C-alpha cells in the first residue's frame, strides 16, 4: 500500500510513524477508508465510505478519534439504562448496542481492548452492577491518560473482588493484585522481581472493598505502613505509590505500546526498535492514550501493507462488523451472544486474568465453524422474532442443546426470505444493481469496503448465474427427472453423498471448478437469472455467506 | 490410515471434505500435504479422557480391603474374599471383574488413588456432581473445570479442544468453555450449516478458498489452512461416526451370562464411545479433552450383579481402548499421548444396607491410566475403624488429582484453572518409557506391529472365547 520497505526490520522507525498523507500513488480510496474503519471502528458501511471520500482523510480521522458530535448525549442515555441490568446477558447486549449505536466506535473498541487488558470476569465478581461500573470506568479512561486509569482500576470494586484484595492484610499479604498489576497491567514478565511483588503486596494491604461490596475502602488498620523496597526504591509505600512506581518504570510504555500495536496495527511481532519512537512520545505525553492511538492510526505504517489485514478479527469485531455491513436494519442483539460464546468471546467473562488469547488463537475448528455458522445466520436472516427472544438466560451456561437438529432433513430449496430490514439481499439491491457484475461489486463494497479482486468476483458471478434448486432441472440426467420449476425429488441429505450421484466425466483442468447442478451446459438453453426473482435473491444471500467464510473476512 | 497424512490424503482422495464433485480442488491436496509441517513442534498434544461414573461408585468394592475384618463385618453379603479379588497388595484388591485394569496395574500403567474426596462431603448426587465438575466445594464457579482449562490449553491442528460423547446435556465440567467444545448430542456444533442449495454452495466455498497464491507467511494463508482444518475435522468426526469396517474389531463383551457383540458404531456403550475416541485420536483430530459417562452406579439394592457388570464394562472398555491405541507411528506410540481418568460424585456407605446394596457415602477412589502414568497405589486405603457418620474419611482432595493432570499432563497452569495451588501427586512421568519392561510376552496368535512390545489384553474371564 504505502511506500515502505517490504521487510519490516528495514523500515526506518522515525519514518514509519510520520503522518500519512494521500498522494497520487496512495490515494484516499475505498480500500484505505475501509481499513481505517475496521481498526478505528467496527467497519464502514458504503454510505460511510462515500462520506469519508467526500470529507477527506483529516476530517474523517478526526471524527473517528472524537466520535460523533452527539456521542456524549448518547452515552448519557446509555448510562441511564446500563446501570439497572441484573442479568449479565442483558449487560452484554447493552454493550453490543453501545458499540453499534453509541456514536463513538473508537472509544468502544478501546473499551474492549482495555476490558481484555484488565480482564475481569463476572464469573467471580458475580455482580452486574460492579461489572457495569468497571465497564463505565474503562470507557471513561479508554482514551484518557494511563496513570489515573491504572490508579482507578486498582481501586475498582470489581477488580478488588476479582483479585482478592480483601484478603491482603498486614502480616498476611495476598500477592494476587500486586503480581498482576506488574505482570499484566503495566510492565510484563521480566521487568520486576519476586521481591518487588512481595513488597508491593504489602503496600497494597488495606486497599479493600467495603462490607457491602459496593465501593473502595482504605482500611488503614490493616495496612502495613512499614518500609518497602520496590524497583530498588525505598519508602513507606502505599497502593498509590506502587501505581506511580509502575508508571514511572521504563518498561511501562514499552508494554502498553506493544499491546496497542497488536490491537490497532499488526499482530506480527515488530522489531523492538520500531516502537521506540512511540514509546518515547507516549512517556513524554505522560501516557496520553488518545494521542498514541491518533499517531498510530494516522501513520505511514498504518496505511502500509505491514498493517493491512494483519490482525485476526476478534469475535465481537466479526459479529458486530458483519451485522453492520450487510443487514439493512437492526437485529435482536441478544441473538449475538450465543454465537459469540461459540466463537470464543463472552463479554464480561474473559477466561482468566490474562484475558482472551487473541490473534490466531481465536481460530480453532470449533470457533471457525461457529463463525461460518454465524455467517449463515446473518446471510439467511435467521433472527429471533421480537417476541421470542430468550430473556434472562443463565450466565456462562451453554444452552441445553436441542437434538431435533439431528433428524429431519431440511426441505429442499432456500428458506423463506427474511423481513426486508433483515434481508442482506435488500442491502445489496439498495443501489439497484443492473446486472450480475454490479451485484457482485456491491457485495464486495458491503463486506470489504471495496470491489473484490477480479478472480474472486468472477467466481461469485459464476455462482450467481446458476439456477437455484427451486428452478433447477434434475441433477441426474435420469429419465423422468423433475421438471424445471419443481424441487428435485432427491432430498439434499442424500444428494450430497458422493456415491449417490455418478460424477459426470469432466475434462481435467488446472483450474478447480465447482460442480454445478446443471450438467448439460452445451445443450440446455443458457439460463438467464432474473435479478428480481426470489430465487436469485436466495443466491445472493448464499453468496454473502460464502464471502463471510473467506479467510480474508476473518482478518481485520 | 493410522497417521494424519494418510488420512488427509485418503479423505482428499475420496473428496469427502466439502468436495462433493469429482474434481478434487488442488488446494486441498496441497494443503493436506502441508498440514503436518507448519504446526508448532513444541505444542503439547497429550489427551485426557475423563470417564464419569454416574451415580456414586462404591469405592469399597472397587478397591476392596479384603484383608480387613471390618470390611467383611460391614459387608456380610457384598464383600470379596482374598481369593476373589485381584490383589493389589496384602490389604486390598480390585473387583474380580476388573482383569483388564489389573493388567494395566501390573504393567505399571494404572494409578489407584485412594481416599479421595473433599471437605464436608455432600451426599446429594446433583450437588456433589457439581462440586466435582466445578472443582469447587463452594460451588462459586460458574463454569466447569475442563471448560476453564480449554482457553489456556494449546491445541494442535486447530482441533476442537474438547468433545463430549453422549446425548445428555453438556456436563457441567465442560459448560462455559467459550468456543472450544462440541457435543455429539448437538450436530449443529460440528456441522457446517447451509440452509438449502447445499451442493453448489459447498462448491462455491471450496472454489473461493482455492486461491492459494500469496506468501506462505501471509495471515490469510494461515486462516485458509485453519478453514481447511476445520472442514477436515468435521469430516473426520463424520467419518469416524460411520466408520463401520474399522480394522480394530471390538471384543465381544460378556454380559448377563452371554457374549454381546459390540457394535462399533454404537455410541451408546462405553466401549463404543471409547472406540470412537480411539478412532478420532488415530485420525489425528486435535481434540485433547474427551468426556464420557458410564451411568448406573447408584446401587442401593442388589448391588453385586449391577456393580460387577458396570466395573467389568469399565475395565474391559479401558483395556480395549488402550489396546486399540497401541499403534506405532514415527512420533511414537499413540497410546503414549493418552491418559484416562475416572471419577464418581461420591463413594458409598461402609456398611451395606438391608437390600444387599449400599447407600450414599463419601471418600472413594479414582483411577488414572496411561503409558506415562506412574502406576501403583497412591495414598493409603482409608481406615475402616475411623469413620465419620459411617463413612470413610478422605485424605486426598480431588483437586490434587486435577492439579496434577493439568500441570503435568495437559501443560495448563493449574492455579489459573482451580484458583488455588494444590499439592501435586506423583501420577505422571513424561520420561517414562513404554510398558515394554513390565508386560508379559505377547500371547500366541496376535500379530503385533514390528517393534511393538505391547501385550494384548488378557482374554475375558471364563468362559473363554475364540477371537
Image: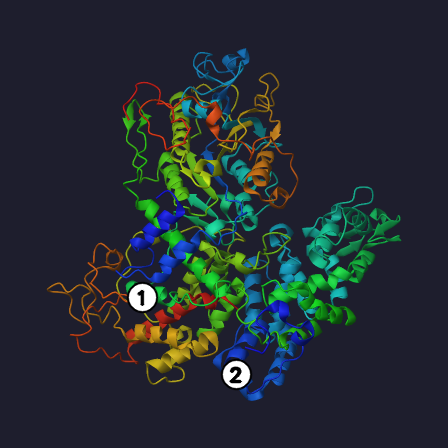
Label 2: few (<14), some or many (≥20) within 10 Å? some
Q: Chain of mark 2?
A: A
Q: In the rendered image of this protein, does residue A509 appear above or below residue B152?
A: below
Image quadrant for the N terminus of chain B? top left
Of tags 1 and 2, the one toward the viewer is 1
- Using the image as rendered, state which of residue A345 and residue A411 is in the foreground: A345
Residue at 55% x, 88% y is A54
- Describe the element under mark 1 as helix, strand or loop: loop
Residue at 39% x, 32% y is B323
- Describe the element under mark 2 as helix, strand or loop: loop
Q: Tell which residue pokes out farthest to the left in this image.
A: A479
Q: In the rendered image of this protein, does residue B20 appear above or below residue B184?
A: below
Tell me where residue A253 appears, x and y as whole percent.
73, 64
Q: In the rendered image of this protein, does residue A347 appear above or below residue B332?
A: below
Q: Chain of mark 1?
A: A
Does residue A348 appear in this view?
yes
Residue at 55% x, 87% y is A24
Q: CA distance from mark 1 to mark 2?
A: 33 Å
A268 sits left or right of B164 in the view: right
Residue topped by disc 1: A512
Residue at 31% x, 66% y is A512
Counting the numbered discs, the total is 2
Q: Quadrant of residue B446?
A: top left
Q: Upstream in the sequence, badge 1 or badge 2?
A: 2
Residue topped by disc 2: A29
- Using the image as rendered, state which of residue A253 and residue A507 is in the foreground: A507
Q: Quadrant of residue A18?
A: bottom right
Tell me where residue A136 appears, x and y as whole percent.
66, 65
Amino acid at each position: 500500500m504505502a511506500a515502505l520497505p517490504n521487510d519490516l526490520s528495514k523500515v526506518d522507525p522515525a519514518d514509519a510513524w510520520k503522518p500519512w498523507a494521500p498522494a497520487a500513488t496512495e490515494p484516499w480510496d475505498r480500500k484505505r477508508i475501509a481499513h481505517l474503519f475496521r481498526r478505528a471502528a467496527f467497519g464502514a458501511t458504503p454510505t460511510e465510505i462515500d462520506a469519508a471520500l467526500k470529507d477527506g482523510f483529516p476530517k474523517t480521522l478526526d471524527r473517528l478519534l472524537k466520535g460523533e458530535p452527539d456521542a456524549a448525549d448518547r452515552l448519557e442515555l446509555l448510562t441511564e439504562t446500563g446501570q439497572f441490568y441484573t442479568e449479565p446477558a442483558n449487560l452484554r447486549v447493552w454493550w453490543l448496542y453501545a458499540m453499534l449505536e453509541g456514536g463513538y466506535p473508537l472509544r468502544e473498541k478501546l473499551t474492549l481492548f482495555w476490558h481484555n487488558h484488565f480482564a475481569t470476569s463476572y464469573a467471580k465478581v458475580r455482580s452486574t452492577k460492579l461489572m457495569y461500573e468497571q465497564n463505565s470506568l474503562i470507557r471513561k479512561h479508554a482514551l484518557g491518560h494511563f496513570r489515573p486509569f491504572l490508579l482507578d482500576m486498582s481501586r475498582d470494586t470489581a477488580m478488588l473482588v476479582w483479585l482478592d484484595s480483601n484478603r491482603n492484610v498486614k502480616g498476611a499479604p495476598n500477592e494476587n493484585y500486586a503480581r498482576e498489576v506488574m505482570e499484566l497491567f503495566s510492565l510484563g514478565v521480566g521487568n520486576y522481581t519476586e521481591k518487588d511483588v512481595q513488597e508491593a503486596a504489602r503496600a497494597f494491604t488495606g486497599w479493600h472493598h467495603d462490607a457491602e461490596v459496593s465501593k473502595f475502602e482504605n482500611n488503614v488498620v490493616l495496612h502495613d505502613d512499614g518500609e518497602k523496597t520496590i524497583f530498588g526504591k525505598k519508602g513507606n509505600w502505599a497502593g498509590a505509590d506502587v501505581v506511580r512506581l509502575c508508571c514511572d518504570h521504563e518498561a511501562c510504555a514499552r508494554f502498553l505500546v506493544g499491546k496497542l500495536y497488536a490491537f490497532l496495527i499488526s499482530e506480527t511481532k515488530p522489531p523492538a526498535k520500531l516502537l521506540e519512537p512511540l514509546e518515547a512520545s507516549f512517556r513524554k505525553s505522560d501516557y496520553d492514550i488518545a494521542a498514541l492511538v491518533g499517531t498510530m492510526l494516522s501513520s505511514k505504517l498504518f496505511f502500509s501493507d505491514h498493517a493491512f489485514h494483519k490482525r485476526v478479527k476478534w469475535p465481537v469485531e466479526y459479529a458486530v462488523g458483519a451485522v453492520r455491513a450487510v443487514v439493512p436494519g437492526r437485529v435482536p442483539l441478544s441473538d449475538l451472544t450465543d454465537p459469540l460464546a461459540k466463537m470464543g468471546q463472552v463479554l464480561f467473562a474473559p477466561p482468566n486474568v490474562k484475558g482472551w488469547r487473541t490473534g490466531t488463537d481465536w481460530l480453532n475448528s470449533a470457533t471457525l465453524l461457529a463463525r461460518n455458522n454465524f455467517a449463515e445466520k446473518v446471510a439467511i436472516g435467521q433472527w429471533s422474532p421480537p417476541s421470542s427472544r430468550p430473556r434472562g438466560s443463565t450466565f456462562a451456561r451453554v444452552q441445553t442443546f436441542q437434538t431435533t437438529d439431528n433428524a429431519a432433513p431440511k426441505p429442499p430449496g432456500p428458506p423463506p426470505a427474511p423481513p426486508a430490514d433483515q434481508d442482506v439481499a435488500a442491502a445489496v439491491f439498495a443501489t439497484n444493481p443492473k446486472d450480475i457484475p454490479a451485484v457482485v461489486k456491491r457485495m464486495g463494497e458491503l463486506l470489504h469496503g471495496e470491489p473484490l479482486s477480479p478472480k474472486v468476483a468472477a467466481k461469485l458471478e459464476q455462482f450467481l448465474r446458476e439456477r437455484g434448486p427451486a428452478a433447477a432441472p434434475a441433477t441426474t440426467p435420469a429419465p423422468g427427472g423433475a421438471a424445471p420449476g419443481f424441487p428435485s425429488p432427491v432430498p439434499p441429505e442424500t444428494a450430497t453423498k458422493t456415491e449417490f450421484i455418478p460424477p459426470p466425466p469432466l475434462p481435467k483442468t488446472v483450474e478447480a471448478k465447482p460442480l454445478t447442478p446443471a450438467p448439460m451446459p452445451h445443450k440446455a438453453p443458457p439460463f438467464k437469472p432474473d435479478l428480481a426473482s426470489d430465487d436469485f435473491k436466495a443466491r445472493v444471500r448464499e453468496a454473502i455467506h460464502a464471502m463471510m467464510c473467506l479467510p480474508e473476512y476473518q482478518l481485520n | 490410515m493410522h497417521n494424519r497424512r494418510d488420512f488427509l490424503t485418503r479423505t482428499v482422495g475420496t473428496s469427502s471434505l466439502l468436495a462433493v464433485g469429482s474434481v478434487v480442488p488442488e488446494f486441498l491436496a496441497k494443503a493436506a500435504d502441508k498440514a503436518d509441517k507448519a504446526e508448532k513442534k513444541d505444542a503439547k498434544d497429550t489427551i485426557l479422557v475423563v470417564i464419569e461414573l454416574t451415580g456414586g461408585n462404591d469405592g469399597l468394592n472397587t478397591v476392596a480391603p479384603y484383608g480387613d475384618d471390618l470390611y467383611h463385618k460391614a459387608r456380610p453379603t457384598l464383600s470379596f474374599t482374598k481369593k476373589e479379588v485381584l490383589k493389589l497388595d496384602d490389604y486390598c484388591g480390585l473387583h474380580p471383574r476388573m482383569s483388564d485394569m489389573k493388567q494395566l496395574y501390573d504393567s505399571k500403567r494404572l494409578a489407584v488413588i485412594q481416599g479421595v474426596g473433599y471437605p464436608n462431603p455432600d451426599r446429594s448426587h446433583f450437588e456433589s456432581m457439581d462440586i466435582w465438575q466445578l472443582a469447587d466445594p463452594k460451588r462459586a464457579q460458574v463454569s466447569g473445570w475442563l471448560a476453564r482449562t480449554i482457553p489456556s490449553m494449546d491445541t494442535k491442528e486447530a482441533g476442537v479442544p474438547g468433545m463430549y460423547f453422549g446425548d445428555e446435556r453438556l456436563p457441567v465440567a465442560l459448560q462455559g468453555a467459550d468456543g472450544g467444545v462440541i457435543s455429539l448430542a448437538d450436530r449443529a456444533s460440528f456441522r457446517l450449516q447451509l440452509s438449502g442449495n447445499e451442493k453448489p454452495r459447498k462448491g462455491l466455498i471450496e472454489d473461493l478458498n482455492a486461491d492459494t497464491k500469496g506468501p506462505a507467511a501471509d495471515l490469510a494463508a494461515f486462516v485458509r489452512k485453519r478453514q481447511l482444518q476445520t472442514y477436515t475435522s468435521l469430516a473426520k468426526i463424520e467419518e469416524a461416526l460411520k466408520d463401520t469396517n474399522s480394522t480394530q474389531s471390538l471384543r465381544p463383551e460378556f454380559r448377563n451370562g452371554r457374549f454381546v457383540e459390540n457394535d462399533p458404531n454404537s455410541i451408546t456403550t462405553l466401549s463404543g464411545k471409547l472406540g470412537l475416541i480411539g478412532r478420532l485420536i488415530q485420525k489425528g483430530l486435535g481434540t485433547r479433552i474427551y468426556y464420557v459417562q458410564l451411568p448406573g452406579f447408584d446401587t442401593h439394592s442388589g448391588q453385586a450383579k449391577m456393580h460387577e457388570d458396570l466395573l467389568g464394562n469399565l475395565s474391559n472398555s479401558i483395556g480395549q481402548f488402550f489396546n486399540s491405541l497401541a499403534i506405532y507411528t514415527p512420533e511414537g506410540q499413540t497410546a503414549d499421548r493418552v491418559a484416562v481418568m475416572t471419577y464418581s460424585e461420591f463413594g458409598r456407605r461402609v456398611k451395606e444396607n438391608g437390600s444387599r446394596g449400599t447407600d450414599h457415602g463419601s471418600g472413594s477412589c479414582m483411577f488414572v491410566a496411561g503409558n506415562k502414568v506412574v502406576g501403583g497405589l497412591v495414598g493409603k486405603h482409608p481406615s475402616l475403624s475411623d469413620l465419620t457418620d459411617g463413612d470413610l474419611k478422605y485424605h486426598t482432595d480431588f483437586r490434587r488429582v486435577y492439579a496434577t493432570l493439568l500441570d503435568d499432563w495437559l501443560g495448563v497452569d493449574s492455579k489459573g484453572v482451580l484458583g488455588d495451588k494444590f499439592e501435586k501427586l506423583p501420577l505422571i512421568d513424561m520420561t517414562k518409557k513404554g510398558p515394554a519392561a513390565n508386560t508379559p510376552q505377547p500371547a500366541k496368535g496376535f500379530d503385533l506391529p514390528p517393534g511393538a512390545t505391547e501385550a494384548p489384553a488378557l482374554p475375558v474371564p471364563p468362559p473363554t472365547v475364540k477371537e
